[in-house]
Amino acid sequence: MSATKTHGHAAAHDHHDDHGPAKGMMRWLTTTNHKDIGTMYLIFSLVMFFIGGAMALVVRAELFMPGMQLVDPGFYNTMTTVHALIMVFGAIMPATVGLANWMIPLQIGAPDMALPRLNNFSFWLLVAAFSLLILSLFVPGGGPAAGWTLYPPLVLQTGDAFPLAIFAIHLAGASSIMGAINIIVTIMNLRAPGMSLMKMPLFVWTWLITAYLLIAVMPVFAGAVTMLLTDHFFHTTFFAAAGGGDPVLYQHIFWFFGHPEVYIMILPAFGIVSEIIPTFSRKKLFGYDAMVYATASIAFLSFIVWAHHMFTVGMPLAGEMFFMLSTMLIAVPTGVKVFNWTATMWRGSLTFEPPMLFALAFLFLFTIGGFSGLMMGIAPADFQYHDTYFIVAHFHYVLVPGAVFAIMAGVYYWLPKWTGHMYDMKLANIHFWLSAISVNVLFFPQHFLGLAGMPRRIPDYSTQFADWNMVSSIGAFGFGLSQLLFVYIIIKCARGGARASEHVWDGAYNHGLEWTVPSPAPYHTFDEAPVVK
Amino acid sequence: MAQGNQSAEQRRRIRRTAILLGVVALLIYAAFIASGMLKAQA
């Protein structure tokens, strides 16, 4: 039966070649076109970015001054928790999946993803997941408030929101796994003739490795939250010490997922930056092979560092030494990447269009986040930094001017290919500078707050922390408002503007198959596979 | 390797790889729950 379906799809695909998409809502509900699904992922992630961002602004508004101002502590904790869950699983991951959907078939010369119906199902499952998570805010007892890590026993005190949040996580995880399977089979089976693995664009490579990471660790997280569910409703004691269980076991399992999860968000960002820097340096990427091996090394190392997130729970000295040293090792392949991006720019004919500006900001600011991560990887020092605002500053540097800036760079890089129009460069430059300045005003002072001892996840604080909190909150509102400009630029570009050429950027010529198709990319591309030499 | 002209062999390979990866994901899920059960019984 399955074979018949596949055959039917292939036949239908052949007949679709000469017409565009279906009309109306059904196009979006039933589409199996990788470009449509990519667009839906990107729009979904943008909506989630604003919902999660609004929650962050509630947090920063409360922290603007010492004392309790706007919300009660329970709701504050709900905001920090759901903000993180939405940003990680609803904004950053779907944005990179959206870019993968749009660009991987175009970059490898495939007409679509290998499993288009599964692709559609993955997307709509994600919508269901986040509808449930947002619904959980409105049930008796309020939304989940134990932090995105969902540590027991605290998380078991969640009210009616608990099963909703756990089910939402299961659905989002299933969506991610199906998406990852699709990406792997597409890359392994549908590459154009002549495109060997070591000729693939770096974005495709980073996504191939990310997809394997997803399949390896999303089931681990699903297993952990399933055990939470049975502890809550079926009186098992996986994580309850009173019944012979161990709450620290949850932390081990969570971070065995959680650390690779960081790389699931950042590796595609590395891929995007590796596409952009050569284009605007008008050079080939320096050290392509080394970049591939560095990406694979980072992915491997991500499995053996998890306990650096939990040095303070108490573990044997040998364990602390092992996790400290393995964490330090990650700096080596990451350093290779930073070196190669810099070497690519060396003596290049650089220009600074918006994608390059965001990529350069990524390079500098992600490196700051990387260095503060190294500081916390030192076990004895981590006892000082743990659960302070220093860690909040660290991971926000990695994820906001890191992953989010790279995603914005990717959108500005490929938007003319998607829409067929150039966007307003002046506004995009303004968007960059507003974002780059405000993101530092927002997060840099949090290093000082953390070093001075301000704890995270607390709605009130001592007056000694007042000044930097006020600065950080001003930066937060500046950054949030700046993103409205991003939406305006995208809408304006989608509606019209100067025509974009086939290869859009003069430096993009010869940089990949996506630049060989017209702008906008036709609804169906590469029905005849291109030959790569 | 164009999908529009996918051969039966290619379709079989896609299906086989996808099923294999799905089974691996399910096994990892089951293995971690089993590890929790063993730990709780210890």
Image (tube, coloured by chain):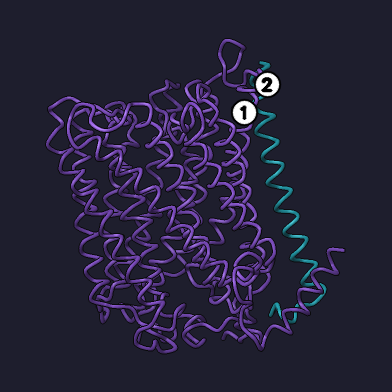
Chain colours: A purple, B cyan
Question: Quarter of the image containing the N terminus of chain A?
Answer: bottom right
Determine the residue positioned at 79% across, 77% down. B7
**Which chain hosts label 1?**
A
Q: Of residues A515 and A382, which is closer to you in this image?
A: A515
* Image quarter hosting the C terminus of chain A: bottom right
The picture places residue A7, in percent across and down from the top left corner, at 81, 74
Disc 2: CA contacts within 10 A as few (<14), some (14-19) or many (>=20): few
Q: What residue does disc 1 label?
A: A229
A381 lies above or below A32: above
- Residue drawn at (71%, 80%) of the image: B4
Residue B9 sits in which quadrant?
bottom right
The percent position of residue A273, horizontal first and vertical second, equals 38, 66
The percent position of residue A326, horizontal first and vertical second, equals 43, 40
Question: Do badges 2 and 1 share one subunit?
Answer: yes
Instruction: Tell me: residue A210, above or below residue A472.
Output: below
Pointer 2 residue = A234
> What amino acid does circle 2 point to?
Phe
For mark 2, give the secondary structure.
loop
Instruction: Tell me the amino acid under the disc marked 1.
Output: Leu
The residue lying furthest to the right in this view is A1
From the viewer's perspective, tell me whether residue A241 is left or right of residue A393.
Answer: right
Q: Quadrant of residue A223?
A: top right
